Image (cartoon, rainbow, N blue to C red):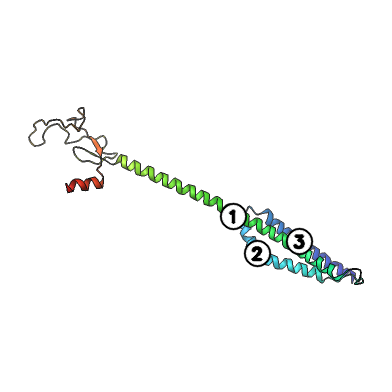
Amino acid sequence: VLGRERDVRLRLVEDIDSFCQRVQQAESSSHNPDAVSAFITEYPDVNVAADALCSRACSLPQVEVPIDDIPFEARTKAEKLRRFVMADRLLKAKDLCVWRLEQQRRQLAAEAQEGAEWVRHLGGLLDRYAEELGQVCYFCAERFCATSANTRCPYNLGSSPRSGRPLPPDLRVPSQLWGAGVHYWVPLPSPSSAAAAAAA
């Protein structure tokens, strides 16, 4: 009988040690999001296992002593204390996991906000580059691009294409470019200014 009781208590001690190792492992893996999510998912089962271990410990045969030596209130308080200690460890492990998840959420939110600011900044740069590169030739209305940047302009000849007579220089064109057969790039008119010119 004593051997059987000893085996029962040894198995209970082993189960309690295994349970404590499981909680400590979850606490040490709080930096791993997968482990944290798994622990939060398993928390109800872990809580049930803790209650089961407390029940097994309380159901063991008690030492036969007079009721006057060990008051009933003391046994009740000892049982509640054991439950409190185990529940406190579970709650601390859960709180640590939740705090780790909150820290990761804040970090990801800050990175997302920083990425959005960079996207807006790059979008502004692209708009400015598009405005700077939006140019056309003053003479032939050729759009500025890599292929037309260094080509000849068939209309910048300084003479009339029909009669061949020299034309007076246009003051809006630099004198060194007038009649040189090259493109003179000017900013592309905006849609609003083009509509106003058409209306006039």
For the point 47% across and 48% down, which residue is it? 115
Does residue 11 appear in this view? no
Nearer the N terminus, badge 1 or badge 3? 3
The residue furthest top is 176
Picture coordinates of residue 67, whole percent (x, y): 90, 72
Disc assigned to residue 102:
1
Q: CA distance from mark 2 to mark 3?
A: 19 Å
Place residue 165 in its image quadrant. top left
For the point 21% across and 33% down, which residue is it? 182
Q: Amino acid at mark 1?
A: Glu
Residue under circle 2?
42
Q: Amino acid at mark 2?
A: Glu
* Direction from residue 7 to residue 94 in the image, left or right: left
Residue under circle 3?
85
For the point 8% across and 37% down, which residue is it? 162
Q: Amino acid at mark 3?
A: Val
